[in-house]
Image (cartoon, rainbow, N blue to C red):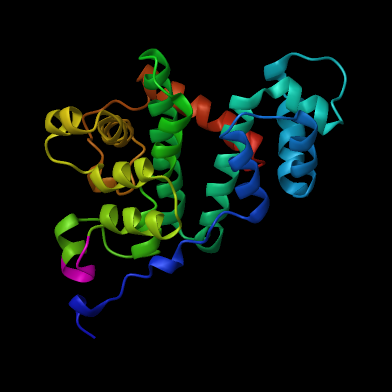
């Protein structure tokens, strides 16, 4: 088999679990009932445990233990619950290849991009959750195209797969009927001209910019993409991303 014949498995990207899919559908609309949300959460014991863990974290400064999902949902709030459910769902996508160092690097790069995108969106009065979602999913094409292998290079990907990981991710999202905005952000996140992309699609440009910033800050997928001149250990932004990432991963029971 020549390099040009390596197939791209668009079906290699697993869908969200039924519980996560139903929760995201409800959380993306007008929430009618916190009680119904708590019942949905109870269908996935691992996710329910993480919601309770978050509600009991020092972040909320409560005394005593929260043992009710209904109380936990009220305490956490819809936006933070949506972010937790989404992050949990995406993390499940990485589970089949979690043992591979590359998957860990993709996860941390994607999470750093999502954190930055949400913060910039809030500062600009945009939709922080949509930009968080786009950031979290923008590099999912790397899982579709290859689980491990040589350093990422768009020209190499074109040679091996006849498409880049950005294009593969966009096609996989379309296959799974995810919103077009997310597919567009994935497709364009390596755009050469950020100013032109900003004029054409500001949302995709934000994802692309945060992807580059995450890489420059030390959260690169491949070491060759990291700028050695960036003092990652001393940079306040890097420390902030690390703290936020630790908070999120602790909430998911990953630490």
| Image quadrant where one finds the N terminus | bottom left
Residue 255 in view, yes or no: no
The image quadrant of residue 141 is bottom left
Q: Which residues are magenta?
A: 159-163
Up/down of 53 relative to 87, above or below: above
Residue at the (16%, 28%) spot, across then down: 199
Name of the residue lying farthest toward the bottom:
1
| Image quadrant where one finds the C terminus | top right
In-image side of 131 versus 31 (left or right): left
Determine the main secondary structure of the stretch shown in magenta.
Answer: helix
Up/down of 38 relative to 143, above or below: above
- Give whichever of 214, 78 is nearer the camera: 78
The image quadrant of residue 84 is top right
Residue at the (42%, 17%) spot, across then down: 122
Q: Report how many numbered discs are placed on residues in the image.
A: 0
Q: Is residue 86 magenta?
A: no
In-image side of 244 versus 145 (left or right): right
Residue 123 in view, yes or no: yes
In-image side of 249 versus 10 (left or right): right
Residue 155: % across, % down: 14, 59
Residue 222: % across, % down: 30, 49
The image quadrant of residue 228 is top left
Residue at the (68%, 50%) spot, across then down: 19
- Give whichever of 129, 236 is nearer the camera: 129
Residue 49: % across, % down: 76, 40
Up/down of 226 relative to 89, above or below: above
Residue at the (65%, 42%) spot, across then down: 23
Residue 118: % across, % down: 43, 25
């Amino acid at each position: 088999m020549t390099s040009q014949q390596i197939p791209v498995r668009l079906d290699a990207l697993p869908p969200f679990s039924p519980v996560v899919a139903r929760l995201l559908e409800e959380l993306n609309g007008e929430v009618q009932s916190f009680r119904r949300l708590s019942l949905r959460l109870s269908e996935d014991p691992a996710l329910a445990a993480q919601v309770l863990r978050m509600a009991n974290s020092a972040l909320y400064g409560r005394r005593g233990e929260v043992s009710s999902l209904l109380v936990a949902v009220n305490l956490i709030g819809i936006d933070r619950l949506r972010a937790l459910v989404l992050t949990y769902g995406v993390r499940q996508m990485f589970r089949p290849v979690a043992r591979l160092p590359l998957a860990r690097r993709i996860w941390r790069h994607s999470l750093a991009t999502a954190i930055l995108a949400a913060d910039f969106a809030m500062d600009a009065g945009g939709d922080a959750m949509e930009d968080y979602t786009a950031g979290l999913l923008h590099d999912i094409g790397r899982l579709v195209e290859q689980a491990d292998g040589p350093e990422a290079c768009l020209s190499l990907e074109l040679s091996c797969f006849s498409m880049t990981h950005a294009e593969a991710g966009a096609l996989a999202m379309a296959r799974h009927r995810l919103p077009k905005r997310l597919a567009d952000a994935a497709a364009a996140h390596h755009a050469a001209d950020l100013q032109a992309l900003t004029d054409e699609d500001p949302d995709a440009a934000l994802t692309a910019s945060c992807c580059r910033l995450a890489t420059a800050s030390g959260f690169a997928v491949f070491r060759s993409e990291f700028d050695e001149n960036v003092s990652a250990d001393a940079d306040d932004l890097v420390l902030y991303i690390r703290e936020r990432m630790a908070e999120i991963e602790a909430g998911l029971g990953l630490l």
